[in-house]
């Protein structure tokens, strides 16, 4: 009796559609959903009702924007990234003392500008480039080089 092999049958992907999807700019609907999450996290920080998850969302925006800027996509945002990083660091230090996440006026302005620049960056590059930046950011964080951690 011969051994019978069972071959895997992979679902077929239309390579042309796949390539076009990767080459197009990310659709506005998906970016708007992401933006709403970021703006609501900032709003919670402004009102003093933010959670660690809200802080983490803003840190993720910062990390992704900074990674894209360092790779040539809107490098003019780097000074704003430094201001936002300092503001989020101060918020983390304040949280350790008082268990409340809040931002200063300058920090709020820096985060607002950061979110606007992030929107410009993400809406001006292709989806595959955006995914590549996300992967680079994940690898950067996995290497232990992220902004700040709340303990």
Image (cartoon, helix red, strand yellow):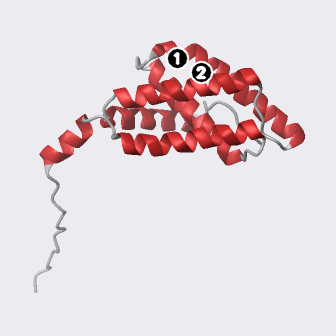
Numbered badge on residue 81: 2
Q: Determine contact: label 2, label 1, CB under 8 Å.
A: yes
Callout 1 secondary element:
helix
Extreme residue toward the left, this view: 1
Q: What is the spatial separation of the Cα atoms under label 2 and label 1, in whole angstroms?
A: 6 Å
Q: Residues within 10 Å of mark 1 (few under 14, many from 20)?
A: some
Callout 2 secondary element:
helix
Q: Residue at x 15, y 74 (%)?
A: 5
Residue occupied by mark 1:
77
Q: Is 104 in front, or is 76?
A: 104
Q: Quadrant of the N terminus?
A: bottom left
Where on the picture, by quarter, is residue 9? bottom left
Extreme residue toward the bottom, this view: 1
| Residue 66 against residue 18 in the figure, above or below | above
Q: Is residue 66 visible?
A: yes
Q: Is 3 in front, or is 139?
A: 139
């Amino acid at each position: 009796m011969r051994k019978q092999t069972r071959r895997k049958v992979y679902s077929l992907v239309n390579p042309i559609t796949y390539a076009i999807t990767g080459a197009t700019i990310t659709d506005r609907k998906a970016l708007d959903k992401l933006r709403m999450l970021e703006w609501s996290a900032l709003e919670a920080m402004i009102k003093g009702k933010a959670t660690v998850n809200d802080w983490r969302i803003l840190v993720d925006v910062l990390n992704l924007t900074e990674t894209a800027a360092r790779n040539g996509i809107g490098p003019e945002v780097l000074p704003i990234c430094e201001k936002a990083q300092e503001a989020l660091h101060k918020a983390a230090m304040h949280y350790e003392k008082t268990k409340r996440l809040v931002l200063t006026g300058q920090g709020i302005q820096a985060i607002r500008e950061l979110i606007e620049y992030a929107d410009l960056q993400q809406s001006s590059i292709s989806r595959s480039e955006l995914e590549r930046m996300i992967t680079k950011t994940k690898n950067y964080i996995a290497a232990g080089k992220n902004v700040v951690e709340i303990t």
